[in-house]
Image (cartoon, rainbow, N blue to C red):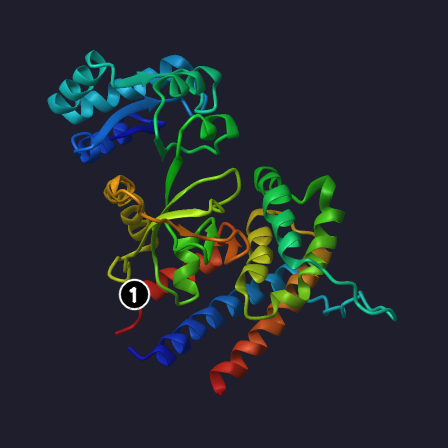
Amino acid sequence: MLKVIALCDGLGRALKYWRRIGSTPGIEMHLVVANSTDRALGRTFASHAKYIVTHGLSAALLSGSLIVRRRVRFFASNMNGQRITRHIASLRADVGLHGAGCIYKEAIIGALRLGILNAHIGLLPQYRGRSVMEWSLLELQRTGVTVFFIDTGIDTGARVVVRREIDVSGFPCVAAAKTFLFDCDAVLYEDALRILLEPGKALEIQRADEGRRYFVMSQLFVGVVERLLRPPS
Amino acid sequence: MAHSNIIYIRDKLLLAALETRLAEVERDLGGLECKEATSVSIYPAKSVDYEEVLRLLMVRYFPNVKRAGILGSVSTDILALLRELEQPATGSDLRFLDAFNNYFEVARTAEQEFLEIYRRVLRAKVDHLKLGIRC
């Protein structure tokens, strides 16, 4: 049995993970919804309420059921807040799923027995950092998603659980391709958790000095990538 | 599509983009002629950690420049770092050239020295690409 906590900065993403993974045999799932942007408390809860209103009865019923079953906790602080770290430690969970726009401090990573999984939209160890899907396309390399246990560095965590090549050449634009890769996160987290449930399964180890670190791509080069996605017939 | 064809298409697209950018930079410079690189030394070149220079430019300085829209009070530091990247920026690793692209795009009033370095880099890269495409 694996106890898993999805660490999210929005209710929508938390429910998405729950729907995909919540009933997987061998997994006990919990959700933590933090306020990663440090918005005012009222605005944070207004955004949760808005999500429920716009996603109808099923979202409302699922949220209510998770609250009653104590499977979801909402926090006013960002993900590295002390209350969240204490809550995670008290759950004695095995794995966290990264679903928030933040960089984790060691305290929160250390509060999970195995660590926090991140679905990175590039193939590690070659493509670390920012805009990696765009850089992969510009360098005419394969695109995909890697699920690995994070450390405090930038995509340098040693233990890789899933590396999946995903072709995005059929997409009409960079934004659509990127959204598609980001949306693969729940499916690939599920695959990663199934692998972790296999007894004695050895994980692939990546070295921090392999590959390159990439940075945000300029508009000039993004324009080139846009054209590469739809080359002249 | 054969891989060599894809490389050809990519290089043609890159060339077109860089030529357009070069024209913009030359317009901003208002016809001032290109200065030669000034970092000529009689001593052997010191070894530069290009990865670290790139990291400093894109992690330490770039977010502030993007917010402010100008190179600002740290322009001397930024220009010194960009000068270090002038040589690798004309090579095959496009991350170094893209540091220049990024700074040009966010700094609303780029300094003349920056534009001169950027123009040299763009001219060299355009020449390399033209040669590659011809071959």
**x 80%, y 65%: residue:** B39
Which amino acid type is marked by label 1?
A: Arg
Query: What residue do we see at 60% from left, 51% from top?
Result: B103
- Given residues A44 and B27, the one toward you in this image is A44
User: Dividing the image into 4 quarters, which one contains the C terminus of chain A?
Assistant: bottom left
* Residue A15 higher or lower than A89, as above or below: below
Q: Furthest-left residue in view?
A: A57
**Image check: A71 left or right of B54?**
left
Q: Which chain is home to disc 1?
A: A
**Split into 4 quadrants, where in the image is the N terminus of chain A?**
top left
Q: Is residue A15 visible?
A: no
- Observer-nearest of A25 and B94: A25
Can residue B45 be seen from the camera position used here? yes
Q: Position of residue A56 (x, y in %)?
A: 14, 23
Give the quadrant of residue A193.
Answer: top left
Q: Is residue B43 left or right of residue A145?
A: right
Residue placed farthest to the right in the image?
B42
The answer to whether residue B64 is above or below residue B20 is above
- The number of callouts visible is 1
Determine whether B59 is above or below A29 in the image: below
The residue at the far bottom in this view is B135
Q: For the view shown, which residue lies furthest in the front direction?
A: A200
Query: Where residue A38 sits in the image (x, y, percent)?
Result: 46, 21
Q: How far from the left and from the top, in percent, is residue B68?
A: 61, 38
Dot 1 falls on a residue whose secondary structure is loop
A185 or B42: nearer the viewer: A185
Looking at the image, residue A62 sits to the left or right of residue A104; the answer is left
Q: Quadrant of residue A168?
A: bottom left
Disc 1 target residue:
A230
> Could you say where residue A79 lies in the image, as x and y percent from the top left?
43, 24
Which residue is painted at 47% across and 24% down in the image?
Answer: A80
